[in-house]
Image: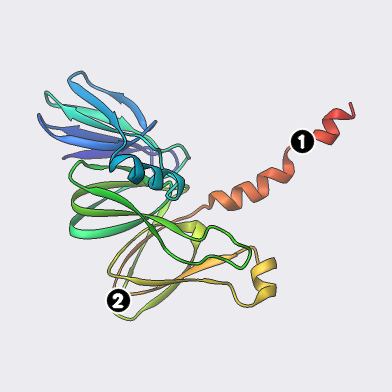
Amino acid sequence: MEHEIDYRPSFALLTVHLDTGERLRTEAGSMVSHTPGLDVETKANGGILGSLKRSVLGGESFFQNTYTATEPGHITLAPPLPGDVVRHDITDETLLVQSGSFLAADDTVELDTKFGGGRSFFGGEGLFLLKLTGTGPTFLSSYGAVHEVELTEGEQYVVDTGHIVAFEESTTFEVRRVGGMKSTLFSGEGLVCEFTGPGKLWLQSRSQDAFLTWLIPQLPSNTSSSGQ
C-alpha cells in the first residue's frame, strides 16, 4: 500500500494508492477525493455497542467508511484540523491513539476503545484512547506538527495529555496531575502522562484544548450583542 503526504506539516494531504482488492478503513468525513473504481461501504465497525463506545468515549465517528479498489487507483484524505499526517505499520502489536488522531488504516487492523486512567478529582473524563491491534499500515493525524520520541528501556518522559498523538503498547504510562493542587489549578497543564520505555511516542506540537482556552474568551458574548 503505497502513499504520499503533501503540504506537511501544516496542511497535510494523504494520498493512498490501492491495488485491486485492497481495502482501506477511514474516519468518516476524511475523504477529499478518489479515482473511479473505488467502492465505499459505510458501517458501524465492531457492531452497535463497539461503535457507540468508540464514538462516545473515543471521540471518533460512529460510522466509518471502508474503500475497496475494484481496479488500481488512489484516495486522498485530510484530517479536520490543520496539521500533519504520519504512517506507522504495526505487526501483531497494539498502538494506542489519542481520540481524534485516527485517520485511516488497513481493513485488517482492529479498532477498540481503552480507558487510559487519570480521572481528575473534578470528575473529568480522563484519558480515553483508541486501541489499534493487528498487522497493517495505520495513518495518524495531528494538530500541528508531529514530533517522534523513542524511549529506551526504563527511560521516562512526561507529556501533557493534550499533546499526545499515539504511543506503542510496549511503553508503560501513568496519568497524573501536575504537582499539587495549586499547580493543577493554575499551571495550565492539568493532567500529564508519564511514560516509561521502551517504545515510541508521537506528539503534536499544538493542543486543541489550549487553542480553545485562548479562543473562547475572544468571542463576542451574548450580553454584549444583546445590549446593542
Residue toward you, 198 or 8: 198
Q: Position of residue 5 (x, y in %)?
A: 30, 40
Residue toward you, 58 or 167: 58
Write the residue at 33% across / 46% down.
50
For the C terminus, the image quarter is top right
Q: CA distance from mark 1 to mark 2?
A: 48 Å
Q: Position of residue 200 (x, y in %)?
A: 31, 65
* Position of 56 relative to 97 (above/below): above
Q: Which residue is mark 2?
A: 152
Secondary structure under the numbered disc 2 in the rendered image: loop
Write the residue at 45% across / 42% down.
10
* Position of 227 relative to 10 (above/below): above
Q: Position of residue 163 (x, y in %)?
A: 48, 57
Q: Which residue is mark 1?
A: 220
Quarter of the image for residue 217 reads: top right
Disc 2 packing (10 Å; few <14; some 14–19; many ≥20):
few
* Position of 133 relative to 159 (above/below): above
Horizontally, residue 216 falls left or right of residue 200, namely: right
Secondary structure under the numbered disc 1 in the rendered image: loop
Write the residue at 32% across / 75% down.
197
Question: What's the amino acid at mark 1?
Answer: Pro
Q: Residue furthest right?
A: 227
Question: What's the amino acid at mark 2?
Answer: Thr
Which numbered circle lies on residue 29? none
* Position of 128 relative to 217 (above/below): below
